[in-house]
Amino acid sequence: MTSFDQRDFRNALGTFATGITVITTTHNHAEPVGITVNSFASVSLDPPLVLWCLDNDAYFHDIFANCSHFAVHVLHQDQEAVSQIFSTKNSSKFNSLDWEMGEFGSPILKDCASHFECEMERQCDGGDHVILLGRVTAFKTHKDKPPLIYHAGEYQVLKIL
């Protein structure tokens, strides 16, 4: 049992700048679903592995916990609205966006800084989250699109020195 305030702990974690991603998959191999996530990281180049964390109480928890494939989309600095769309429980998230079905059955959002199509490799308990490890099966990147950054509870723009 910890003896410090959870809000203070969360604020301390917020001093670490992260990128913003949208994770997508399909429900029953048909309905596209997606969620905004900032807990994304690379794990290994060989084999190519990435991870992300999902709150156990998340609206789409069961769908992502039971999917065989998912896609990770790194948002660029002009996609704050996309981040906001996928941070809601709204079922019509994909209606106003340009997307296509990926090679491995996950919805692929167009115009992101990059995207990674993944096969579920493994899941691990992470306290109040589940850690989802994916094997990258395909990816695409657009180096000319700076990433959307989140720091101290606010969206930020990457300043290149």
Image: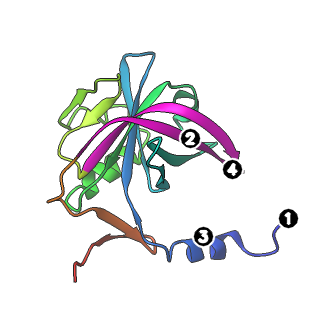
Mark nearest the camera among 2 and 1 is: 2
Give 32 or 76, whichever is nearer the viewer: 76
Element marked by disc 4 = loop
Measure the alpha-carbon separation of dots 3 and 1.
Answer: 16 Å
Label 4: few (<14), some (14–19) or many (≥20) C-alpha neighbours in 10 Å: few
N-terminal of the pair, mark 3 or mark 1, is 1
Taking the image as shown, residue 104 lies to the left or right of residue 45, namely left
Label 3: few (<14), some (14–19) or many (≥20) C-alpha neighbours in 10 Å: few
Measure the alpha-carbon separation of dots 3 and 2.
Answer: 21 Å
Measure the alpha-carbon separation of dots 2 and 1.
Answer: 25 Å
Q: Which residue is identified by label 3?
A: 10
The answer to whether marks 4 and 3 mark residues whose Cβ atoms lie closer than 8 Å is no
Q: Which residue is identified by label 2?
A: 132
Label 1: few (<14), some (14–19) or many (≥20) C-alpha neighbours in 10 Å: few
Which stretch appears magenta? 114-140
Element marked by disc 3 = helix
Question: Which x, y percent locates residue 161?
Answer: 22, 83
- Indicate which disc residue 1 carries: 1
N-terminal of the pair, mark 3 or mark 2, is 3
Residue under the point 33% across and 52% down: 83
Question: Which x, y percent locates residue 101?
Answer: 26, 25
Q: Amino acid at mark 4?
A: Asp
Measure the alpha-carbon separation of dots 4 and 3.
Answer: 14 Å
